[in-house]
Amino acid sequence: MEIHAQYDQHIEVHKYYAGAIFGVVVLALALEALLPVYFRWAAILELPLLVTIYFGLSRRNPSTGLLLGMAIGLAQDSLGHTPFGMYGIAKTVVGFVASSFGSRIDVEHPISRFMLTFVFFHLQNAVLVLTNRILLGQHEPYLETRLVIASVVNSAAAVIFFARWYKLRKPS
Amino acid sequence: MAIPSRHRSLTLFAAALAAQILLLAVQIRRGQQVRPIRVWAIESVSPLGRGAAWSVDGVRGLWNNYVALRHLREENDQLRTEMGALRMRNAQLESRAAEADRLAGLLGFRDAHTEVQMIAARVIGASPDPSSHMVFISRGSRDGVKRDMGVITPEGVVGKVFAVYPDTSQVLLLTDKESGVGALLGTSRAQGPVRGSGEPLLALEYISNDVKVEQGEKILTSGQDRIFPKDLPVGTVMQVQPDHRSPFQKISVQPSARLDGLEEVLVLMTRQEFNFRKDADKSAPLPLGPKPEAPLVSSKPASPLAAPKPAAAVTAPKPVASIIPSKPPVPATPPKPAAAPTQPKAEAPATPSTPDTPDAPETPNP
């Protein structure tokens, strides 16, 4: 118990204003939908996924993490052309796993953030491919060069964005 | 049955997944999308999209119309400077190309007339006196240039050497009032001197009123002055006016050579008589009956054609009289119009009487 207490002292749980979370989610979804219109290279960014990962890792609460992931995923589905629930399932998984990891490891270091985002990006894609194959019967290839590039780019973006989103925290 | 707190999140996770999988299954089974939710979501985001588009357009307009135009004036000035430099460069290149064409023309002309010794010269200056039509050329006595040598271009007669210096020479252009050349009409072969008037146009004189002269008719050198070879282009008839108070017509002539834009010329290094267009002479009609030279040869010893040494004309003090007289000579007998076609000038007015010859040194007005 003593060890667990010391561990809990090191793993800090961050609180955020509900409005800030809502605003960031809406902004991420809007930018995801609008940025590629003006900048084609912006299509490679997965801002809703980054938001899901960030709040999952920061809040370190699996329940809220999976619910936030589900909400973001369903909103993303509603704005896209995919069947309703595709991104919902993927981001539910990512949100749950991210918040579970966040309560166990240090996610403040840029390298760990990079690696975690890289892993979660591929986890989301794996869930999407599995869902497509199992539920929709579509055999999409999993590993593509574009996917690897996108995962690296999004991981790098996560390192940058996560450092900025730090200011959204409630003062402790 | 209460769910343990440590399994609450797992249960929630499983429920969320199950609900969404069920939702997917329903969609797949029914083959339809959840349209109301999509409409609601898109309608929620579209104002953001419109706002973003408006903002992006505003920023773009601000950037394109103001910020990006900050250095437009400097860029415009720079482009104008570059354009000016390029225009100047283009003009230089065009000038060089034109010079190359002219030099090629001179070279071709010289090669085509190898029987005539001639040297090319560059026009290096003009007379400061606007009333005199003279130019300086880049050849002088060291190059063998002598006074009274003919100066031509491939287009036609330019004038003659008026003064010779070691490295330059002064050329009296055809348009000068004191200049002239023995000439003949290309069609009728009627001869008469062409003299300058100080104006751009020359005057062909002593052509009888009976001789039919057409506008545009070519005027060629007669070769009688022993300065220019025969049949070299002198000019083109521009205007013909019969003079009822005189037996001769007033004929204005446009010089063949561009005397107002000379840059390179050829100096005829010989004054020996030669036939410049042998082939043309054979084919050219001679409407005057007898050979043109025959009636033109004056019995007077003062005639330049009779002068045994043409080089003596170099000593002529007045260049105006070296080729032509300033006034028409009074014929020994009144000119007979009927006889004009065959013998147009009784006293050979077309013959460039050169009073500067030793025999007639100071009698420009016989």
Image (cartoon, coloured by chain):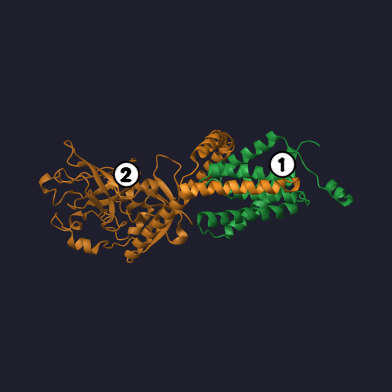
- Label 1 residue SS: helix
Position above or below: A128 against B208: below
Chain (green): A
User: Residue A47, percent across and down?
Assistant: 63, 45
Question: Which residue, as the protein is rendered here, is positioned at the far left?
Answer: B338
Single out the mark in the foreground, 1 or 2: 1
Q: Is residue B311 visible?
A: yes
> Which chain does tag 1 point to?
A
Characterize the local packing of mark 2: few (<14), some (14-19) or many (20 or more) Cα atoms within 10 angstroms. Answer: many
- Label 2 residue SS: loop
- Kindly indicate whether the residue at mark 2 contacts the one at mark 1 (C-beta within 8 angstroms): no
> Which chain does tag 2 point to?
B
User: Residue B97, percent across and down?
Assistant: 42, 55
Tint of chain B: orange
Q: For the residues marked 1 and 2, what is the alpha-carbon distance in whole angstroms?
A: 96 Å
Q: Which mark is residue B196?
A: 2
- Please name the amino acid that badge 1 sits on: Trp
